[in-house]
Image (cartoon, helix red, strand yellow):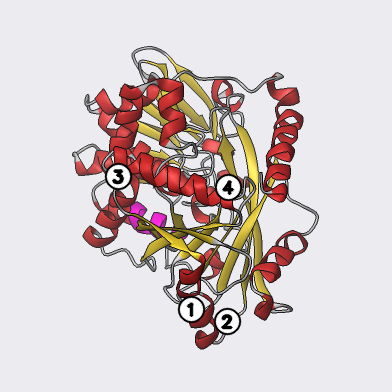
Amino acid sequence: MSSAATTPEAHTGSYYAATANPSPYRPPLMGEVRAEVCIIGAGFSGISAALTLAEGGIAAVVLEGKRVGWGASGRNGGQIVNGYSRDLSTIEGRYGKGPAKALADMSLEGGDIIRDRVARYNIACDLVDGGFFAAFTPRQMRELEHTKRVWESYGHTELEMVDRNRLPGIVETDIYIGGQIDHRGGHIHPLNLVLGQAAAAENLGTIIHEGSAVTRVEDKGHEVLVHTAQGMVRAKTVIVCGNAYLGDAVPDLTNKIMPVSSQVVTTAKLDPALLDRLLPRNQCVEDCNYILDYYRRTADDRLLFGGGVVYGGTDPASIEGKIRPHLERTFPALRGTKLDFAWSGNFALTMTRVPHVGRLSANVLFSHGDSGHGVTTTHLLGRLLGEAVIGRTARFDVFERLPYLPFPGGRALRVPLTVLGSWYYGLRDRLGV
């Protein structure tokens, strides 16, 4: 019997875990229970689905292998980035005008869900409005201008271009030539956000079991049996939201995504006046490189800085060694600054870089592969999963109809071939072409 079945594993040693709001111990599943809906995974997707159902009067049972928000939902950069990991023009060219319009109509909803729930349930998660995309090259500026035109063609008018002269009012660094403000962007403490939503769902009747890793799912047609080391849920419907941390509980899904790790560090507390100078508007920043850096100020006056990827989901030899050069290149004034926290976390990548959503059967639904845009898309897709369970399937169906493409080479070659592709795009970034 694994220890995870009896004692939920502590969160990773991140800044978020160190500053998390109090959260109760949620005992593991013991024995057999019945539920109308069982949700696998207590990250953003699973908790968003649970809260959607709870608001509609359905109390789901949620099974989490570790702790609520233990995976990517509690480790990410905490940035509210709207849209998908592929821009709307690419989506339109790939799937057609109709699906693109449908996805565009939902593209801002994830951020709206976050803000609505923070206000409705009084969630203390350091919500700050405003995000910035930073460009290194004229090509990246042209791409941002193109993105703005495309978004405006779909009715979204919250993007604002910024030239070099205005940059010091956004971020104090010499490495960019301009960028774009997303007034609908923002940043949050992600672990506190998911913990707050979990508490809201529980107050509406949801049952959450931590330390309850799913070992097997049996679809019997009339019901689905979800097994853990010490218990089982008999459910009418199952929603699978394990994403990059699902493991082998549902093999049909594990092989359809690639885990990718990203690394994050957080400085010691800094002089607030220094941060006021470096980030005058307290907006989060994400650069436009293929392998990008992202950073923001925390509520207690630190700089949180992330970036880098390791395909396959492993950790680099030194997280600080990987991230510190990028931090110091961006902000020379922080050279040698002490780093209090360094951690890594996995997100799930799809071949299309668009979330993979669908049904394994009439009774088993899933969503995964947000491909780096998970903070907002998980909230949207969790809502769509909940809607589908209660019979409102139209928006869920838009995503389900998008064709799935497997990684070339299968599981054995998906990492080396993706690394080869990322090397090409990384070279383009370095050459500015």
Q: Which residue is labeled 3 in the image?
A: 109
| Mark in the foreground, 3 or 1 | 3
- Judging from the image, what secondary structure is the residue with disc 4 in? helix
Q: Which residue is labeled 1 in the image?
A: 300
Q: Residue at x 56, y 28 (%)?
A: 249
Crowd rating for badge 1 (residues with CA inside 10 Å; few <14, some 14–19, many 20+): few
Q: CA distance from mark 1 to mark 4?
A: 36 Å
Visible in this render: residue 340? yes
Q: CA distance from mark 3 to mark 2?
A: 34 Å
Asked if the residue at tag 1 contacts the one at tag 3, i.e. Cβ–Cβ closer than 8 Å, the answer is: no
First reached walking from the N terminus: tag 3 or tag 1: 3
Name the outermost residue toward the top.
Answer: 221
Q: Which residue is labeled 2 in the image?
A: 269
Q: Amino acid at mark 2?
A: Lys
Please provide percent x and percent y for residue 262: 64, 51
Q: Is residue 193 magenta?
A: yes
Q: 145 or 46, which is in the foreground? A: 145
